[in-house]
Amino acid sequence: MMARSRSSTPAHDESAPRRAPRGPRRTSALGDKSRASLLPLALESASGRSFHVTPGDGGVVLGANPGCAIVLDDEYCSSRHAMISARAGGWWIEDLDSTNGLFVNGVRVRAAEIRNLDSLVLGRTSLTARVGGGVWPGGSLDGDGGLIHRGQAMDELVARLKRIARGDTPVLLLGESGTGKELLARLVHHASERARGPFVALNCAAFPAELAASTLFGHKKGAFTGALADHKGAFAEADGGSLFLDEVADLRSDHQSMLLRALETGSFRPLGAPNDEHASVRIIAATHRRIDQPGEHFRFDLYQRIAGFIAVVPPLRNRREDIQPIAESLLKRKGRSWKDLTPEARRTLEQYPFPGNVRELIRVIERAVLLSGGGPIRAEDLGIEPSAVLPAAPAQPPSPGRVAVDAQTIQRALDACQGNITHAARSLGVGRSTLLRRMDRLGLRRRR
């Protein structure tokens, strides 16, 4: 291990993380009641890797030693660098006498409580904490793993995914960026028989192409320049659980071939390894791009392998009834409420199409809370151009089976299902005849 210089501790800052209470470094486990109410924790690296901690894991050690629960491939990390544990109803991280220290939100700490979106730095490894395992607004209204929804479209989608989760069928989530596809992937995992196993999330667009094979399948020490230690890939980490491949369409063609072989045989070979290794993994994939056409950039045989069940995630503009409950949850985290919005601000949120979906709604709320300065949140605080706000739709009485989706969403569902109207209707949560009527009204052609 290289010699490492000890970093200096920044001066006191009012934004410094919460300090651990005095007492023994190793605290007793939480009681059953406290443990059950504690949300899971996800740690996301800049390369797109995710590490997951659940209340039942006990003390989780992070470090460079291969025996650690979370192994950090970083020569500036100590062998046993830090430990995460559940205590006092929350998640805490504690420095284990590391050489280069533990930093939370830029401040060197001995121990600190982990809050949602905190930045953790160990050696030269930067991790973003997501309490709730990546929950969008930081809480759960409905027991669906933090996915907040009220409308029929999402209700039916969630119900179908819970049913399909009981088997081991691969799931492909199609939808625009920012719609919550990773949350739905986590929901499938936690509703399955693999829920006790790991959930490993990998953003295929976030790591360099030259590291794709190592990221997916791992490598042995000395396999290439910079491979200073053995490294477990995503497949090995997900053994017995689920592997979520976000933006799977961004994989290069040669890496698609490697992935296809691993899915077909259940085996893979880490870089520099003499023999294959095996892993039992359920694949949940997601993309916002079209990958179902033979001859396109994505292998059609791989598409058929990962598209055991296709779910089309509707954009936020097609489920406007979810805007208020999501905004309410975001505002609550900031100590504000929906009532703090002026009537004009509420109308703006409800009528804005949100091309960035839930991710954009989060940014809008965070900016508005800051600009309001503790006073009423006005429409101008939202930062939304008035010209971008759609006119209010005329009121319509609710009708059973009404398809509240636009032509683009229906076309995406049809494309994903290769023109099969029955399958497309199922993915949208409506009956076949209802979808046909909607297609006729929108002037969408049926494939012959």
Image (tube, grey):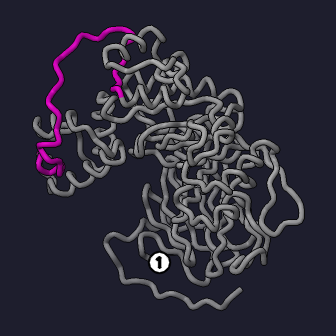
Q: Is residue 418 above or below residue 88?
A: above
> In percent of the image, x 48 and y 11: which residue is there?
432
> In percent of the image, x 41 and y 23: which residue is there?
153
Answer yes or no: is residue 384 visible. Answer: yes
Percent position of residue 300, x then y: 64, 39
Say which residue label 1 marks.
108
Viewer-closest of 59 and 102: 102
> Is 270 on the left-hand or right-hand side of 163?
right
The number of callouts visible is 1
Q: Is residue 18 above or below residue 411?
A: below
Percent position of residue 278, x then y: 83, 50
Query: Magenta stretch: dominant SS?
Result: loop
Percent position of residue 257, x then y: 71, 51
Circle 1 sits in a helix, a strand or a loop, which is it?
Answer: strand
> In percent of the image, x 45 and y 41: which residue is there?
180
Answer yes or no: is residue 346 visible. Answer: no
Quadrant occupied by the N terminus: bottom right
- Residue 405: say if magenta: yes
Badge 1 crowding class, 10 Å Cα cut-off, few under 14, some 14 to 19, many 20 or more, is many
Residue with the most extreme right position:
275
Amino acid beneath label 1 = Arg
Percent position of residue 360, x then y: 31, 48
> Is 430 on the left-hand or right-hand side of 86?
left
Q: Quadrant of residue 379?
A: top left
> Is 358 on the left-hand or right-hand side of 115?
left
Q: Which residues are magenta?
A: 379-407
Viewer-closest of 40 and 215: 215
Q: Is residue 3 above or below residue 253?
A: below
Viewer-closest of 432 and 295: 295
> In percent of the image, x 58 and y 59: which residue is there?
49
